[in-house]
Amino acid sequence: MSNNWFSFLSSLGATFNNDQEVTFNINDDSPIKSLQGDLFLTDLSYLGLIEVGGDDRKTFLQGQLTNDINAISSSLSHMSGLCTPKGRLRSLLTIFSKGDKLFLQLPLPLQQETLKRLQMFVMMSKVELTDANNSLIKIGIFGHQATSSLKKLGFTPPTETNMVTDSNDILLIRLPGDIPRFECVGSLDKIQNLWKELQADAQVVNTSHWKLLEIHNGIPNVYESSKEAFIPQMLNLQVLNGINFKKGCYTGQEVVARMQYLGKLKRQMYRAHCETKDLPKAGDNLHSPSCKSGQGAGNIVDAQKSLDGGVDLLAVITTEAIENKDIFLDETMKIPLSIKELPYTIETNS
């Protein structure tokens, strides 16, 4: 993250942990009680960026990632996965285009590892891979008045999920959710000015609140503690437009395709809630008395404290545990998970 951006947010009361997740000094007398308001603003420095340039950038990425890179354009972004040869996700990426460059976005702790991994396969290709954290700044804007607030400032907000517009040299990416939600990407000066124009009417929130929205919208991620734990279909990527089954070969493609056409998916991602004060981390095991699998009953994908108490989470859970309604957070099986509806329908193969 740019030191100037860090200094700017720090002057507004922001503090950052080692993963550059932000916490603002919100008045204890008025904590965030709902994410259903008019306008919210947050920093997205917890997400790292890899810039991909060169004439062969699309051809190169097409052979590495699960989705069709040729579909990416100045007006469309999408999700994609980087897999091991066994089809396990090393990282989950949001990909967008700016000018003649592609950008891969993922949690910061996995950025350097992913960058080095991709560089191993460049060989003679005309591809340049670089760390773009300091060249582009990212913020999140959401709320019932997010669209109108951006329009008043001369922007043209995208109207459909994954659509991208470029206004005033700032990219706006429409993100999933019933409430308008946008990622804004641009230079330090541009984003800093946008923040200043919005902050008078916006409530500033933490990274944890943004991640909570991702959970509510059923959007997964892969972290250091959960890398290589899931195949793409376990995270519902076939529903979230994160896999293209017609694009041809990429690392792990045989396993992913076999599961889609020949296999039976016995684990998939659900949204859930549990009553606990302890926050589980990505990759943590789940438990079930009826689970006969040696691999366990499931794993946490992401979890955040609910604004109503307890913990909201995404988890990959066995079909067996779901059918028996006996899935627990703890090994002593005293903290049950309550399964909640996802905002989309999961398509299963039988």
Image (spheres, grey):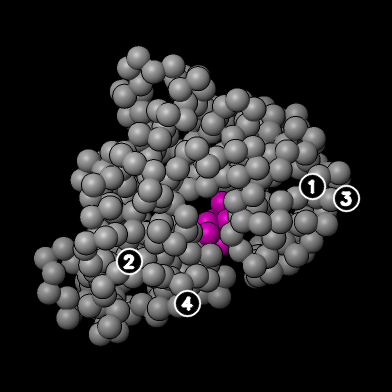
Mark 3 lies on a secondary structure that is helix
Which dot marks residue 156? Answer: 1
Mark 2 vs mark 4, CA separation in Å: 13 Å
Quarter of the rendering containing residue 145? bottom right
Region of the chain picked out in magenta, as a range: 205-214
Q: Circle 3 is placed at which residue position?
A: 152
Chain-order first, disc 2 or disc 3: 3
With respect to residue 21, does 297 lie above or below? below
Counting other residues with Cα less than 10 Å from the Cα at mark 3, is it few (<14), some (14-19), or many (20 or more)? few
Chain-order first, disc 2 or disc 1: 1
Mark 2 vs mark 3, CA separation in Å: 42 Å
Counting other residues with Cα less than 10 Å from the Cα at mark 1, is it few (<14), some (14-19), or many (20 or more)? some
Q: Circle 2 is placed at which residue position?
A: 268
Quarter of the rendering containing residue 138? top right
Q: Nearer the viewer, residue 62 or 80?
A: 62
Counting other residues with Cα less than 10 Å from the Cα at mark 2, is it few (<14), some (14-19), or many (20 or more)? many
